[in-house]
Amino acid sequence: MFKAVFIILSFSCCIFTALAEEIEIMSDSLFVDLTAQTITYNSNVKVTSNQKKILADKLLLATQNSQLRSMHATGQPALYIADMLQAQALKIEFNQAENNLHLLESAKIINKQSSIQGKHLIIDLNENLLIATSSPTKNKIILDLEANK
Amino acid sequence: MRLYWIYLLALVVLLLTIYLLRPSFQLKNGAGQLNEYMLSAKLQSYDKYGNLEQLIDASFWEFDAKAAVSHIQHPQFLNKDWRIEAEVAKIFHSKFNKDIDVINLQGSVRAKMLKKQNLTLETIAMQYLPRQNKIISAEHVIILQDELKIEGDGLTINLTENTMELHKNVQSRIYNIKL
């Protein structure tokens, strides 16, 4: 498995400036499995945290001892929107322990002047890094520095 | 002065007697009759092993034998998973046996999950359906659990499968988390 790492400093200034202490989630309906400790938000899901948003068709929260463990958003595609950045993928996963976002399947990140596409993109919320990973045979990472020109 | 103390003592004894002799009856085991006005009452049901399955405790209980309906005030419903409190409730009893068809809880309804999670539900009306083993509500419901607050309209709790659904207009907040 070949792993390419791109550190794009231009993204870092527009991602994660404010550190919100709460998130708001809206949806049409909700399902809670008390045994599995999961919460599933269905249809028109909107996650808001300060200046950031996730829009998805479905959102699954996994909890442990009443604490959020992870968050999985799926959509056609699911969107992550920050101040000057938009990311999209069929699956967006937020890992609370590692504090990062994984964009899986048809992942794409666009800011004002550039874009990056790949099968698996990771936004590290601690280090303000964008990490792109790919397989050498099957997938490509496309970096377009003039996306919106 | 001595007479005053005697009256006071008599009053205390009277109140204590009323409290100790308050009616208590069992549903499935058939003890007691549901045919009276009561200042306070308990309705208990037991499983086949004799373990307490559920308890309904109320400050005032009126049973309409003709309609097989109990009107109760300040009910407290307790089973192995949930404790539910309300201002008033109506219990619809089966006319063929002593089972309960439906319990309608109204007023300030507050349900607390006893095991596992520190989970509380608040709404203005709720129904318990014993045969389906479900709790439902058509009203606005607030769910609180530590750092999580969820609101929505229409609730179904499946007590057998240990699941919960909100059907419309879901809005929730998770505190102390960064995205």
Image (tube, coloured by chain):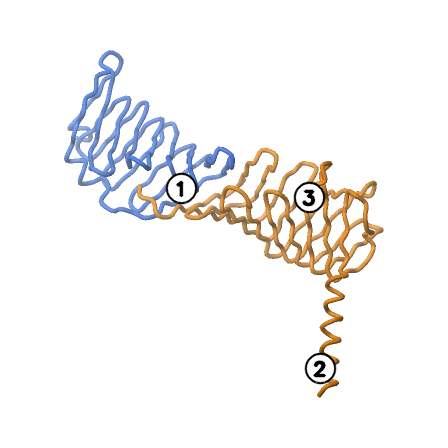
Q: Earlier in the sequence, mark 2 or mark 3?
A: 2
Residue B89 lies, with reference to residue A69, above or below; the image says below
Q: Nearer the viewer, residue A43 or A3?
A: A3
Looking at the rendered structure, the kind of residue marked 2 is Trp
Q: Colour of chain A?
A: blue
In this rendered view, identify the residue nearer to me: A75 or B131: B131
Kindly identify which residue carries mark 1.
A67
Residue for point 59% across, 53% down: B109
Mark drawn on residue B5 = 2
Label 1 with label 3: CB-CB less than 8 Å: no
- Which chain hosts label 3? B
Q: Is residue A105 above or below residue A23?
A: above
Please state which amino acid type lies under the numbered disc 1: Gln
Residue at the disc numbered 3: B52
Q: CA distance from mark 1 to mark 3?
A: 33 Å
Tell me the residue at 39%/39% (across/down). A68
In the figure, the orange chain has which letter?
Answer: B
Left or right of A85: which side holds A27?
A: right
Q: Which circle marks residue B144 in the picture?
A: none
Within-10-Å neighbours for mark 1: few <14, some 14–19, many 20+: some
x, y (%) of residue A143? 18, 24
Amino acid at the residue labelled 3: Leu
Dot 3: what SS?
A: strand
Residue that sits furthest to the right in the current view: B66
Whether marks 1 and 3 lie on the same chain: no
Image quadrant holding the C terminus of chain A, namely top left
How many circles with numbers are drawn on the protein?
3
